[in-house]
Image (tube, rainbow, N blue to C red):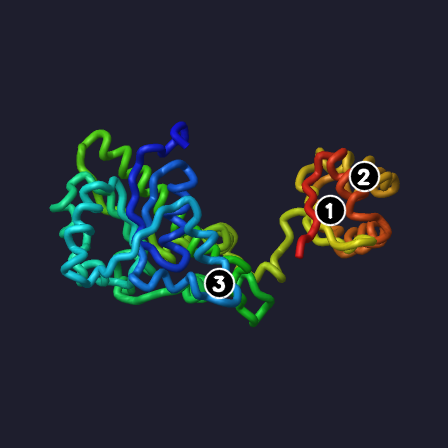
Amino acid sequence: MSNAPLAGLKVLDFGHTVMGPSCGLVLADLGAEVVRIEPVKGDPTRRLGGFGAGFFAFFNRNKDSVALDLKSTEARPAIEAALRWADVLIENFGPGTMERLGLGFEEVKTINPRLVYCALKGFLPGPYDHRPALDEVVQMMGGLAWMTGPPGQPMRAGTSVVDLTGGIFGVVGILAALRQRDVTGSGSLVQSSLFESVAFLVGQHMAVTGVTGAEVRPMAQRSPTWGIYDVFDVADGQVFIGVTSDQQWPRFCSAFAFDVLGADAGLVTNQNRVDQRASLLPELRALLINRTVDEVATACEAANVSFAPIRR
């Protein structure tokens, strides 16, 4: 992809599992030449089962790969040649691992002062920076699992959302560092972490307490912001419908021929509909239960209302 935005950028991806490889993946998808550095026996995610069976294939597409023993003195010349070749290095080993291998930022910048070095960790510098972490660990620590699950039953999100967010924040930092290198001529250290990523993800919930003083409740018990923002059973499945503006409401009622609801002066504003949810939602559920997914989709599209079928 010679016309891709990052064509010509050269990346060494020392990542493993999800966070590091996802950072390299985004760069590769944008056109960078990414070389994955694997252990001699191959990355362990090649052999994962269960929900991790697709990790290697998904997060390492569009990359080249080479196997190196990073502890071997015989591999050192090849490693140093690769470092001189590269514009960017990505790693998400445990704290101190790259330093013990002689591949920490301070060592590497003596080999290639222009290298942008992206270190992806569990925690940014601070009291916990010596700790290893996992996506699920920080979802529990940061409150995301508590917000996701039903009351009293914290539950990790259904994808590796924090690993992915941390990897994408790594990409943002890399691009900023490359822009800075254009000005200074020097590379720099970029850091992204799991815990600080989950803090960003739950920031909107923390802000509720900051703004209102109210205790934040799990999403299953959340105070509604919109009158219609729910999952509905229909004749052949389930759908999500979101009516989030007062302009959408009359269009929604018209598209579905809900004439009585459309004429109700007590439902004109979103706050009216929030206040009337206890009676409004059961009425809507009864009106929609005999519609098909396709019929609901057609009406929502006509009304320019947010809609999604629930996929399994």
Q: Are marks 3 and 1 in contact (CB under 8 Å)?
A: no
Residue 52: which disc?
3
> How many other residues sit within 10 Å of disc 2, few (<14), some (14-19) or many (≥20)?
some
Label 2, label 3: how far apart the Cα atoms are: 44 Å
Q: Is residue 310 left or right of residue 53?
A: right
Q: Residue 103: x percent and y percent?
A: 19, 55
Residue placed furthest toward the left: 110
Q: What kind of residue is marked 1? A: Arg
Q: Residue 8: x percent and y percent?
A: 31, 33
Label 3, label 1: how far apart the Cα atoms are: 43 Å
Q: Nearer the viewer, residue 66 or 36?
A: 66
Q: Residue at x 38, y 64 (%)?
A: 44
Residue 77, visible in the rendered structure = yes
Q: Decide: is 74 above or below 25.
A: below
Callout 3: SS: helix
Q: Nearer the viewer, residue 199 or 208?
A: 199
Q: Is residue 297 left or right of residue 5?
A: right
Looking at the image, is mark 1 or mark 2 earlier in the sequence?
2
Callout 1: SS: helix
Label 1, label 2: how far apart the Cα atoms are: 13 Å
> How many other residues sit within 10 Å of disc 1, few (<14), some (14-19) or many (≥20)?
many
Q: What kind of residue is marked 2? A: Cys
Q: Residue 217: x percent and y percent?
A: 56, 62
Mark in front: 1 vs 2? 2
Q: What kind of residue is marked 3? A: Gly
Q: Nearer the viewer, residue 255 or 10?
A: 10
> How many other residues sit within 10 Å of disc 3, few (<14), some (14-19) or many (≥20)?
few
Q: Residue 164: x percent and y percent?
A: 44, 52
Q: If the image is split into quadrants, where does the N terminus sit? A: top left
Q: Which residue is mark 1?
A: 273
Q: Which residue is mark 2?
A: 253
